[in-house]
């Protein structure tokens, strides 16, 4: 597949939750693309819509959530499907889940069923998409356990989830996700619940698997250090919108949006000389229920101008390959 | 096997479990172990008292009571087991589906279940028997239907809590369909409470089956059934009191053992419950 053809294109995605307290605009107009074999990092603080976006891509939005607008175009080998248009319980989306797009979750403690051996759970995942007999799937599961760096895979196949540590369980989850060679792996904060040393191992593992399996990864996290170690491209989300999108080096060396700059300033510095106080971003994330005019970050932004409170900035290119949704970088008309 | 080892620690449960197994053995082999023909009428031995020939005596038609009690064991075991299976199958299917599907399907199923629970069990069973007829099938449906709400509630409750587990969402994300999730992720969590409930329901079913046939709504004569034998015996309570001993003793022993076994199974499968005592 050439450079031009993306793997997945998300266009104008809006996911709203219709609750008794009103409409929560969890995702409010999000565009991004992921090219084959690239890693997209999605950063943002809690409640900014990262996980909802990921679930929308899997077709896992359940009532009261609803996809209000937009398209999620998945480029299959022979056609393009819009995931938003598929029946979320239908055959088509089930064939895509697991085999084209796989997902791993934040909590390795609860995303494995405690009553089954981990090997059997991987076998089930393989059998779901057919093409293999049970004994063949058994061998494949052991290969996968080996591939994700679980020692003595033949013995560990027989283990129950509670017998494994958090890191091992996350490895088992990754093995399960990789079982059908998905072309896109969505990782929803896979390292958040792990110790720092284990985090590093899991990240190394995912980087290695990406090369071996030629998988694209959508990596969701609020940990900028993890993003620096994994991603090719980064999108920064704030309150349901993408505020900045750029290659990873650009984001770290030349952040354009005041929010991204704020995030960078809130990374602790290890420098002995010139160590400074951490700068936190004042204020809190606006409630998703609030319907606010203008830029959503304006109330917390030290550069906010008149225009920011009146109109919402669009995500426009500020430098080649680098877009920001901020009037500071756009000639205000 | 671990279950058996732990179960055996409970002495009461073990002894009564053995008695219950013996009763089931009697039920399975009833045709071959009756000392006399349970249907054979012998007018020379009407109301014969217990003797070596008739251990429990003979009834108003001179039929051997022991043989009739043995055959009645088979009838009871057959009816109650079938009713229990019927209740579990309908209850678990409806409960799991309602709980997983949610929405109006769940509301409708649960309100219908509440309506079933409004009626006293015997009342409900009588209505069903009157509609379906006093045949074995009718009695099985009546008894099973009356117990199904318990299983619907348990199955739905567990389904509701399990379907929110992350591993269910992970399975959906791996492309699993509804049937796969119900069979592989929900059912294993339901099976234990269902087994406990089923063993606790068994004695209730035995009592209800006897009650129905005591009222003349169960299995029809000449097929023997404990309740119906008791009903016949009560008419001759003064002249031939020995008639009542056999069926009454059988009923007590069966219900008592089934109850104690149910408690023991519950304690074995739910060790937490034991500690609370």
Image (spheres, coloured by chain):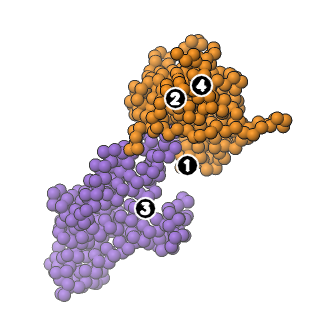
Shade of chain A as shown in the rendered figure: orange
Mark in front: 4 vs 2: 2
Pinpoint the chain carrying mark 4. Answer: A
Taking depth in this image into account, of A177 and B29 the one nearest to the observer is A177
Q: Nearer the viewer, mark 2 or mark 3?
A: 2
Q: Position of residue B271 (x, y in %)?
A: 53, 65
Q: Chain of mark 2?
A: A
Q: Nearer the viewer, residue A68 or A300?
A: A300
Label 2 belongs to which residue?
Answer: A309
Residue under label 4: A244
Residue B232 visible, this orientation: yes
Could you classify mark 2 by the number of other residues whose Cα lies within 10 Å: few (under 14), some (14-19), or many (20 or more)?
A: some
Q: Is residue A280 left or right of residue B152?
A: right
- Image depth: mark 3 or mark 4 in front: 4
Residue under pointer 3? B196
Residue under label 1: A114
Residue B215 percent location from the top left of the image: 18, 70
The chain painted purple is B
The one nearer the camera, A239 or B193, is A239
Contact check, label 1 and label 2, Cβ < 8 Å: no
Task: Judge depth for marks 4 and 1 and give the one in front.
Answer: 4
Q: Measure how far apart labels 4 and 2 are at the Cα level.
A: 19 Å
- The residue at the point 34 percent across, 44 percent down is B103
């Amino acid at each position: 597949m050439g450079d031009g053809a993306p793997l997945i294109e998300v266009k104008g995605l809006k996911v709203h939750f219709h609750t008794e307290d009103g409409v929560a605009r969890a995702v409010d107009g999000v565009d991004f693309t992921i090219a084959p074999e690239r890693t997209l990092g999605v950063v943002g603080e809690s409640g900014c819509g990262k996980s909802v976006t990921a679930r929308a891509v899997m077709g896992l939005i359940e009532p009261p959530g609803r996809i209000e607008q937009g398209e999620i175009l998945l480029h299959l080998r022979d056609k393009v499907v819009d995931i938003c248009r598929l029946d979320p319980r239908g055959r088509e989306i089930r064939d895509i889940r697991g085999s084209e797009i796989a997902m791993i979750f934040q909590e390795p403690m609860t995303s494995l069923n405690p009553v089954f051996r981990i090997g059997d759970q991987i076998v089930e995942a393989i059998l779901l998409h057919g093409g293999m007999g049970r004994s063949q799937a058994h061998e494949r599961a052991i290969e996968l356990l080996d591939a994700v760096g679980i020692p003595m895979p033949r013995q560990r196949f027989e283990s129950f989830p509670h017998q494994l540590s958090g890191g091992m369980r996350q490895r088992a989850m990754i093995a399960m996700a990789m079982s059908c060679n998905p072309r896109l792996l969505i990782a929803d904060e896979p390292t958040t619940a792990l110790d720092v040393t284990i985090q590093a191992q899991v990240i190394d593992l995912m980087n290695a698997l990406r090369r071996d399996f030629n998988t694209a990864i959508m990596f969701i996290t609020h940990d900028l250090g993890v993003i620096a170690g994994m991603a090719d491209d980064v999108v920064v989300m704030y309150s349901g919108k993408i505020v900045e999108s750029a290659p990873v080096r650009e984001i770290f060396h030349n952040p354009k949006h005041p929010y991204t700059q704020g995030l960078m300033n809130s990374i602790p510095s290890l420098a002995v000389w010139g160590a400074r106080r951490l700068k936190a971003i004042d204020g809190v994330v606006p409630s998703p229920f609030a319907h606010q005019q203008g830029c959503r970050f304006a109330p917390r932004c030290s550069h906010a101008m008149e225009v920011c409170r009146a109109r919402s900035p669009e995500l426009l290119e500020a430098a080649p390959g680098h877009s920001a949704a901020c009037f500071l970088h756009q000639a205000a008309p | 096997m671990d279950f058996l080892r732990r179960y055996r620690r409970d002495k009461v449960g073990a002894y009564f479990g053995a008695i219950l197994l013996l009763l089931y053995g009697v039920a399975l082999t009833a045709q071959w172990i009756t000392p006399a023909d349970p249907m054979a009428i012998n007018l020379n031995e009407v109301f014969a008292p217990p003797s070596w020939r008739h251990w429990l005596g003979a009834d108003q038609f001179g039929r051997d009571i022991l043989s009739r009690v043995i055959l009645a064991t088979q009838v009871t075991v057959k009816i109650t087991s079938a009713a229990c299976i019927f209740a579990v199958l309908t209850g678990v299917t409806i409960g799991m589906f309602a709980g997983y599907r949610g929405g109006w399907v769940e509301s409708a199923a649960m309100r219908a279940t509440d309506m079933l629970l409004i009626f006293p069990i015997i009342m409900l069973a009588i209505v069903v028997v009157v509609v379906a007829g006093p045949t074995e099938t009718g009695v099985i449906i009546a008894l099973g239907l009356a117990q199904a709400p318990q299983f619907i509630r348990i199955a739905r409750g567990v389904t509701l809590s399990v379907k929110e587990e992350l591993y269910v969402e992970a399975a959906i994300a791996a492309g699993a369909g509804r049937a796969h999730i119900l069979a592989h992720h929900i059912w294993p969590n339901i099976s234990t409470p269902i087994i406990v409930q089923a063993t606790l329901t068994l004695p209730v079913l035995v009592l209800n089956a006897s009650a129905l046939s005591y009222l003349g709504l169960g299995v029809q004569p000449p097929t023997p059934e404990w309740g119906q034998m008791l009903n016949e015996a009560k008419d001759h309570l003064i002249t031939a009191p020995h008639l009542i001993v056999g069926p009454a003793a059988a009923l007590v022993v069966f219900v008592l053992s089934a109850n104690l076994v149910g408690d023991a199974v519950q304690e074995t499968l739910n060790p937490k419950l034991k500690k609370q005592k």
